[in-house]
Image: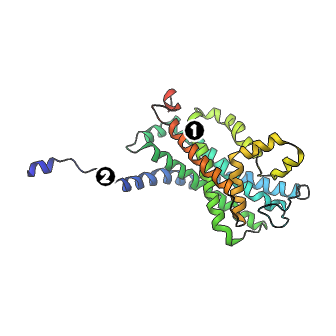
Amino acid sequence: MQTATLNAPDPAPALLPHLLRALRAVVGREIGRFLRQPSRLGSALVRPLLWFVVFSAGFHNVFGVAIAPPYETYVEYKEYMVPGLLGMVALFNGMQSSLSMVYDREMGVMRLLLTAPLARGWLLAFKLLAGTALSVLQMVVFLAIAWAFGVELPLLHLPAALLAMVCGAVMLASVGLVLSVYVKQLENFAGTMNFVIFPMFFISPALYPLWKLEESGAWWLLKLAQANPFTHAVEAIRFAMYGQFNATAWAVVLGCTVVFFVAALWGYDPQRGSISKKPGG
């Protein structure tokens, strides 16, 4: 009886500690790599800061932002731009996360992760959290810089704005997950940026309100903007910054997050997805 007890296999490790170790390994690796390269933060903020400084000065008297929700009075153009540029930070960081996963796949790191004794969905979720954490960090830094440039940020609505920023970053990081399934080589990433990032950013209310498109008669462009998930991520942040809730924007952001994450799960499934069909997965 005693011998049988000694030879019995060890009980399986508890799931929660196992998940926490994997979370610390995956998310900690990404954050640690980011902190060891402080130039990455500067390079990530150069683009939105350039738009913020140059466009807010150059188009200050060109774009008239009408009193339309969520605004209750006329606002300066630089104040209008902030939610869109926050979305830009999350969008480009989501694509950077996709690039990181493609690099890890080419170097063999992704293969090791996907063969770990943990459900594939958890590993992809941790990758999603890592990309979201980096996006939110950069968005908060940009928000502080915008405040230093004179953009008024109601502190009362800051928690709601942060929640909208997190949800928008999660959705855009999930877009990066999906792209990492189909972008097989680093050399193809520039083309992906041209055909995915820039249309998402420019066909949106990030730089100009959608009523401008309606006013100019560009109905087809207006419809594309309304169907663009990035539009709703920006609008959720914009409304939250003024203490308002845009139900349509939140529904699209949350719904697209689920759809994109499920698509990434399917793509990384070795039995069904694209990863199994080509080498390097």
* Residue tagged 2: 13
**Residue 196, horizontal then vertical, whole percent:** 69, 39
Badge 2 marks a residue whose secondary structure is: loop
Q: Tell which residue pokes out farthest to the right in this image.
A: 61
Residue, x 46% and y 45% (percent of image)? Answer: 121
Q: What residue lies at 50% left-to-right and 40% top-to-bottom?
A: 265
The residue under the point 40% across, 54% down is: 21
Residue 270 seen in the current view = yes
Mark 1 vs 2: CB contact within 8 A: no
Identify the residue shown where x is 63% and y is 53%: 251
Who is closer to the viewer here, 145 or 9? Answer: 9
Q: In the image, is residue 187 above or below residue 65? A: above
Q: What's under tag 1, amino acid-wise?
A: Ser
C-alpha span from label 1 to label 2: 31 Å
Marking on residue 180 = 1
Q: Secondary structure at mark 1?
A: helix
